[in-house]
Image (cartoon, rainbow, N blue to C red):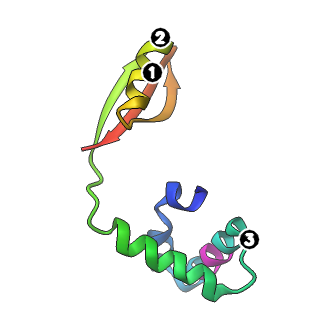
């Protein structure tokens, strides 16, 4: 799950050969893989699934538990808290 949430692994893989090796190693460790081949399966799967996804989000700020629950029910995900307001985002 951590790998899919991160989603920026592709940019690390493209940036430099050293970053590519480090990123693959980190993803493999998080997923518990003994072989880089298993990690590459997930990296290729992520590229196939998310390459067409829109990286634009609708943002909402809420201050009550009830509002937060409603946003989570419709697929929003928690991002952070600012000035006592919880920020959620949902892909457009």
Along the viewing direction, whichever of 70 and 6 lies nearer the viewer: 70
Residue 50 placement, left or right of 7: left
Q: CA distance from mark 3 to mark 2?
A: 38 Å
The answer to whether 71 is drawn above or below residue 47 in the figure is above
Q: Position of residue 82 (x, y in %)?
A: 49, 22
Secondary element at image label 3 = loop
Q: Report if the CB atoms under discs 1 and 2 are less than 8 Å apart.
A: yes
The residue that appears at 44% across and 70% down in the rendered structure is 46
Q: CA distance from mark 3 to mark 1?
A: 33 Å
Residue 64 is labelled as 2
The residue that appears at 26% across and 47% down in the rendered structure is 56
The residue that appears at 70% across and 65% down in the rendered structure is 30
Q: Report if the CB atoms under discs 3 and 2 are less than 8 Å apart.
A: no
The answer to whether 72 is drawn above or below residue 10 in the figure is above
Secondary element at image label 2 = loop
76 falls in the magenta region: no
Residue 30 placement, left or right of 4: right
- Segment tinted magenta in the rendering: 21-25
Residue 68 is labelled as 1
Look at mark 3 in the image and give the residue it sits on. 32
24 falls in the magenta region: yes
Quarter of the picture holding the C terminus = top left
Quarter of the picture holding the N terminus = bottom right
Please report whichever mark, 3 or 1, sits nearer to the chain's N-terminal start: 3
Residue 19 is labelled as none
Q: Main secondary structure of the magenta part?
A: helix
The residue that appears at 52% across and 25% down in the rendered structure is 81
Q: Position of residue 91 (x, y in %)?
A: 30, 45
Q: Report if the CB atoms under discs 3 and 1 are less than 8 Å apart.
A: no
Q: Position of residue 35 (x, y in %)?
A: 70, 86
Q: Position of residue 69 (x, y in %)?
A: 46, 22
Please report whichever mark, 3 or 2, sits nearer to the chain's N-terminal start: 3
């Amino acid at each position: 799950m951590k790998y899919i949430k991160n989603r920026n692994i592709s940019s690390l893989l493209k940036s430099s050969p050293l970053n590519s090796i480090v990123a693959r190693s980190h993803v493999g460790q998080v997923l518990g893989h003994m072989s880089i081949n298993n990690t590459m399966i997930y990296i290729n799967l992520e590229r196939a699934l998310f390459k067409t996804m829109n990286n634009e989000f609708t943002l909402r700020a809420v201050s009550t538990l009830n509002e937060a629950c409603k946003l989570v029910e419709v697929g929003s995900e928690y991002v952070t808290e600012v000035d006592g307001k919880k920020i959620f985002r949902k892909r457009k």
